[in-house]
Image (cartoon, rainbow, N blue to C red):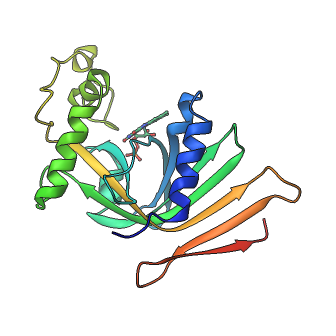
Amino acid sequence: MSLAPPWRSLISRALHHNRSLVYSRYLQLATVKKNGRPANRTVVFRGFWGETNQLKIITDSRSQKFTEIQQKSWGEICWYFPKTREQFRLCGEIILVDSNYSELEFQTARKSMWQEISDNARIQFAWAAPGEKRARMEAFSPALPDIIEPLDNFCLLLFDPEQVDHLQLRGEPQNRWLYTKDEAGRWKVLEVNP
Ligand SMILES: Cc1cc2nc3c(=O)[nH]c(=O)nc-3n(C[C@H](O)[C@H](O)[C@H](O)COP(=O)(O)O)c2cc1C
């Protein structure tokens, strides 16, 4: 079994020290649209997928980002932890696990994620389609969806980091490290100027 990369424990530590701030689990995910322009949005970090270093995020396959991100594409996460005053920028590949994704292991992860989230989070997937002209109020009070079987538009987004840039504001001067994965999948760290 390969060792967890060093940045994994740094993120876990940051989450722990910032646990009193509910928004420390919110991060910004940037992607590139088909026309070459950037798109950026806040999403909730839902943990790492099993033993992997992939971050779990949930999203709706009817949303705009779905037309930007093909089943696999690149993105960047920017994540700031206010209490410990540190920023992580993760560059990596995005894997969109929608209802048509063929690999069973990934479908199982998608289903487990659906079962783990709250009713409140689940019901939003039964709302009128995001980004479309505002629907009537009735479209926002659907029946509670099944808690076992995900709705078709429920999607698990996995983010697989290839580079992690960690900036710590604490310190004079500040501290910054770059973690990169080589072709053999080994992580290297380089301390750089802030
Ligand atoms: C605090 C916060 C948390 C959010 N969490 C998510 C999330 O986990 N998944 C998601 O798809 N959108 C989430 N959103 C909404 C997105 O920021 C965005 O508005 C929506 O996904 C549509 O983006 P798109 O048009 O780029 O697809 C969240 C917004 C906020 C303010």
Q: Give how far across and how far down residue 4 sits, in percent.
A: 45, 63
Q: Quadrant of ligand 1?
A: top left
Residue plotted at (16% across, 57% down): 105
Residue 137, quarter of the rendered image: top left
Residue 19, quarter of the rendered image: top right
**Can residue 99 be seen in the rendering of this structure?**
yes
Q: Which residue occupies the foreground of this view, 157 or 65?
A: 157
Horizontal side of residue 52 vs 15, given as left or right: left
Residue 115, quarter of the rendered image: top left
Residue plotted at (25% across, 28% down): 122
Horizontal side of residue 90 vs 133, given as left or right: right
Q: Which residue occupies the foreground of this view, 32 or 72?
A: 72
Residue placed farthest to the front in the image?
1
Residue 67 against residue 15 in the figure, above or below: below
Q: Give how far across and how far down residue 85 sits, in percent.
A: 72, 44
**Can residue 61 be seen in the rendering of this structure?**
no
Q: Give how far across and how far down residue 160 sits, in percent.
A: 39, 63
Residue plotted at (58% across, 46% down): 13
Q: Which residue occupies the foreground of this view, 35 or 49?
A: 49
Residue placed farthest to the bottom in the image?
183
Horizontal side of residue 86 vs 30, given as left or right: right
Residue 60 against residue 124 in the figure, above or below: below
From the image, which quarter does the C terminus lie in? bottom right
From the image, which quarter does the N terminus lie in? bottom left
Q: Which residue occupies the foreground of this view, 43 or 165?
A: 165
* Total numbered labels: 0
